Image (cartoon, rainbow, N blue to C red):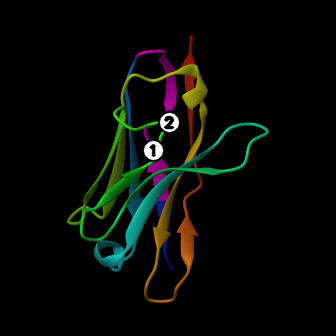
Amino acid sequence: QVQLVESGGGLVQAGGSVRLSCAASTIIFSVSAMGWYRQAPGNQRELVATITSGGSTKYADSVKGRFTISRDNAKKTVYLQMNSLKPEDTAVYYCKLESRTDLRNYWGQGTQVTVSS
């Protein structure tokens, strides 16, 4: 069973930085695409950034140049470095694993990031 555990969220001032981590408990991590999504109150969950098994990345326009997604296959962990944070970045951040083995998506429980102005 795939388990994803996010950590690193918290309260930060506007302009500050936070690094989120998502640790996976599966041997398929290295061959899986990973993503970070976020959901603010009253809003739908939206894509923030993705990274393929080969390391190719994509970002939402709203975070380009400020956020960086990366992965460490040896540690089975994906990271989201968030710089120059804005109050509108406040949300619960979730990581997702896209399994090519069973064609399912797996989600973590989420971690809250709150950016104060």
Residue at the (24%, 66%) spot, across then down: 73
Give the residue type that dot 2 points to: Ser
Spot the residue most to the left.
74
x, y percent for residue 97: 46, 68
Q: Residues within 10 Å of mark 1 (few under 14, many from 20)?
A: some
Label 1 residue SS: strand
Q: Which mark is residue 7?
A: 1
Left or right: 71 in relation to 60: left
Q: Earlier in the sequence, mark 2 or mark 1?
A: 1
Q: Secondary structure at mark 2?
A: loop
| Residue 12 magenta-highlighted | yes
**Residue in the foreground of this view, choosing between 60 and 99:** 60
Location of residue 50 (image quadrant): bottom left
Q: Marks 2 and 1: which is nearer the front?
A: 2
Highlighted range, magenta: 5-15
Find residue 101 and report its image quarter: bottom left
Which residue is identified by label 2? 62
32 relative to 96, above or below? below
Q: Left of 66 or right of it: where is 95?
A: right
Outermost residue toward the bottom in this view: 102
